[in-house]
Image: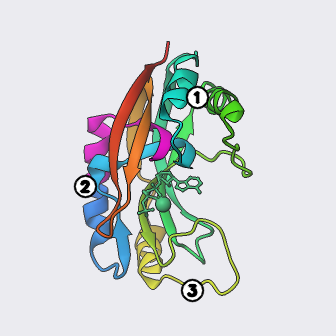
């Protein structure tokens, strides 16, 4: 199974983002938009694994307070000039990084490596081209996202609101040509 650990978002915020997404979707050829119902904040990607039961047990031992999240602003990976991932920014309170660290520590004994890069909380809204968030030689530009970038340049930072995450979730991802499907396998309360 292909697994990852993530936070889900409140429906009020989901709806505001869905509206913004509709506005941005116009005139952005070749951009693959994430379905609003599947928006999430990835804490750790586990990839293909058969150790589901061990993972569930490890995650059940994690303790931490609820996490406050503020959704504002947008950005691009790997950079605005080479945009392939379009995301909404997240300002998290001081409880998010410890939760990411606890998740990493809980899963390390099962052989899952922590991300090399610093954790940068974000909500992926669209992908273009290879969809890779980092640069590789021979990368091609994704013109559709440059149009999105141009559209946003003259606007103030969009604001999508705040929420408190009271749980984190183990998700299964099922890849398909029409986009990945996510299934919630287990919920872990915070607080
Ligand atoms: P698709 O791969 O079809 O574009 P997706 O990226 O949403 O769809 P998955 O690849 O299963 O689906 O990824 C699930 C979650 O884990 C997403 O939030 C994705 O950004 C994140 N993710 C995927 N691969 C990695 C990786 N190598 N490192 C960190 N996070 C990853
Ligand atoms: Mg992917």
Q: Where, by quadrant of the figure, is residue 33 drawn?
A: bottom left
Q: Is residue 17 left or right of residue 88?
A: left
Determine if residue 162 is in view: yes
Point out which mark residue 93 bears. Answer: 1
Q: Tell me which label, 1 or 3, sits earlier in the chain.
A: 1
Label 1 CA crowd tier, 10 Å (few <14, some 14–19, many 20+): few
Q: Where, by quadrant of the figure, is residue 187 drawn?
A: top left
As for residue 7 lying within the magenta part, the answer is: yes
Bounds of the magenta span?
A: 1-19
- Name the front one of labels 1 and 3: 3
The x and y percentages for residue 53 are: 49, 28
The x and y percentages for residue 79 are: 62, 69
Point out which mark residue 19 bears. Answer: 2
Residue at position x 48%, y 58% in the image: 87
Q: Tell me which label, 3 or 2, sits earlier in the chain.
A: 2
Query: In terms of secondary structure, where does tag 2 sit?
Result: helix
Q: Is residue 100 above or below residue 32?
A: above
Residue at position x 58%, y 71% in the image: 80
Q: Is residue 156 above or below residue 38?
A: below
Farthest top residue? Answer: 191
Residue at position x 29%, y 56% in the image: 35
Can you identify the residue that label 3 sits on? 140
């Amino acid at each position: 199974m292909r697994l990852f650990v993530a936070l889900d978002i409140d429906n009020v915020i989901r709806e505001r983002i869905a509206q913004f997404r509709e506005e941005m979707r116009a005139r952005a050829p070749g951009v693959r938009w994430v379905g609003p119902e599947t928006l999430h904040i990835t804490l750790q990607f586990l990839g293909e694994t058969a150790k589901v039961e061990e993972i569930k047990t490890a995650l059940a031992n994690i303790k931490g307070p609820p996490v406050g999240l503020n959704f504002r602003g947008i950005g691009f990976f790997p950079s605005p000039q080479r945009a392939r991932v379009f995301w909404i920014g997240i300002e998290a309170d001081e409880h998010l990084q410890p939760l990411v660290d606890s998740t990493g520590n809980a899963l390390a004994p099962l052989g899952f490596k922590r991300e090399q890069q610093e954790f940068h909380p974000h909500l992926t809204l669209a992908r273009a081209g290879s969809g890779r968030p980092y640069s590789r030689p021979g990368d091609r530009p994704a013109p559709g996202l440059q149009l999105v970038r141009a559209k946003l340049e003259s606007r103030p930072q969009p604001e999508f609101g705040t929420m408190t995450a009271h749980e984190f979730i183990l998700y299964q991802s099922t890849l398909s040509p029409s986009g990945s499907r996510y299934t919630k396998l287990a919920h872990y309360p915070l607080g």
